[in-house]
Amino acid sequence: MTSPIRIGALISGSGTNLEAIMDACDNGRISGQVVFTGTDKPEATGLQKAAGRGIPTFAVNYSGIIADWRQAPDDQKLPADFDLADIRARQSFFGADADPEKRDRFLCTRAIAEAAMLENMASYPFDLLVLAGFMRNLSPYFIDRVNTDSVLPRIMNIHPALLPAFAGTDGYGDTFRYGCKVGGCTVHFIDYGEDTGPIIGQRCFAIHETDTLADMKKRGLAEEWQLYPECIQLFAENRLQVVNMTHRLAGGKIYQRKVVKIVQE
């Protein structure tokens, strides 16, 4: 018998994936319950869907934090345990040629916002954190404070494309504009990069010549609402393992990557 897990959720908008997860918890497809829903946008309408089911909600105004930093950076208070040099060395969003001021502003404002997120989340113990349309990249500062188990990550995300293709904020749009005949969605664990974490599951669908982008998104969302609960249930059943794979490429170069192994029942 699988013990129910406690699920925290972060959203940025209407919360359609959140609703699919809550429905799956209610009808037994997921052995668990959503214990809180947070957002980076106080106006996110998905909060109402959670509150309507008695789930605690909170908001951290990322845009306001960024605006305050731009106006008076010296007046902003960074978390006491934030080490800019350490986070700078471990992040994967900015390359060596990135604008240092832009990079550090991003990392510092993220840390302020993420510390507020973590403070709110501390009231609600959870086993898994799901990003359900959360449109902010998480920094190593946040990730390391949630992924306390070195073996199994516990931050899961759904992306509207078949990763590793079309990472970023507009997966369906990028897929559509490229002229692909197949679209899809991907559930993966979060790492320090943008949509680069180990893949848990994927679903795909045909893109027809007569489809509009709206048609494609509608079909994709239907797949998302099936895939995400399936992957969360695998976590609840303790059937996900992240393992290191080593490959020897042409010329003898060694390449390593993390992959998710699904343990059979």
Image (tube, grey):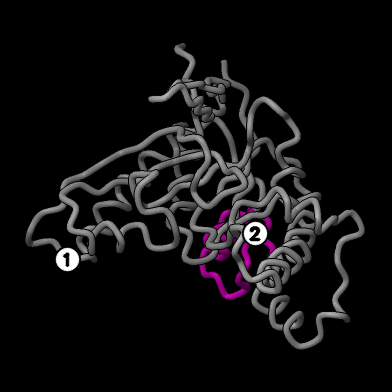
The residue under the point 44% across, 41% down is: 187
The local secondary structure at tag 1 comes to: loop
Identify the mark nearer the N-term, 2 or 1. Answer: 2
142 or 29: nearer the eye?
A: 142
State which region is magenta. Answer: 37-59
- Evaluate whether residue 129 shows in this view: yes
Residue farthest to the front? 251
Per the model, the C-alpha gap separating discs 2 and 1 is: 32 Å
72 or 231: nearer the eye?
A: 72
The residue under the point 64% across, 28% down is: 152
| Residue for badge 1 | 212
Task: Rate crowding at label 1 as few (under 14), some (14 to 19) or many (20 or more) other CA atoms within 10 Å.
Answer: few
Q: Nearer the viewer, mark 2 or mark 1?
A: 1
| 61 is higher (above) or lower (below) than 236 | below
230 or 190: nearer the eye?
A: 190
Dot 2 amino acid type: Gly
Quarter-of-image position of residue 10: bottom right
Residue 25 part of the magenta segment: no
Residues at badges 2 and 1 in contact (C-beta under 8 Å)? no
Residue 116 lies, in percent from the top left, at 78, 62
Residue 38 part of the magenta segment: yes
The residue under the point 30% across, 39% down is: 203
| Residue for badge 2 | 38
| 178 is higher (above) or lower (below) than 261 | below
Residue 135 lies, in percent from the top left, at 53, 62
Residue farthest to the top? 265
Residue farthest to the left? 210
The residue under the point 73% across, 67% down is: 104
Dot 1 amino acid type: Thr
Quadrant where the N terminus sits is: top right
| 175 is higher (above) or lower (below) than 69 | above
- Evaluate whether residue 22 shows in this view: no
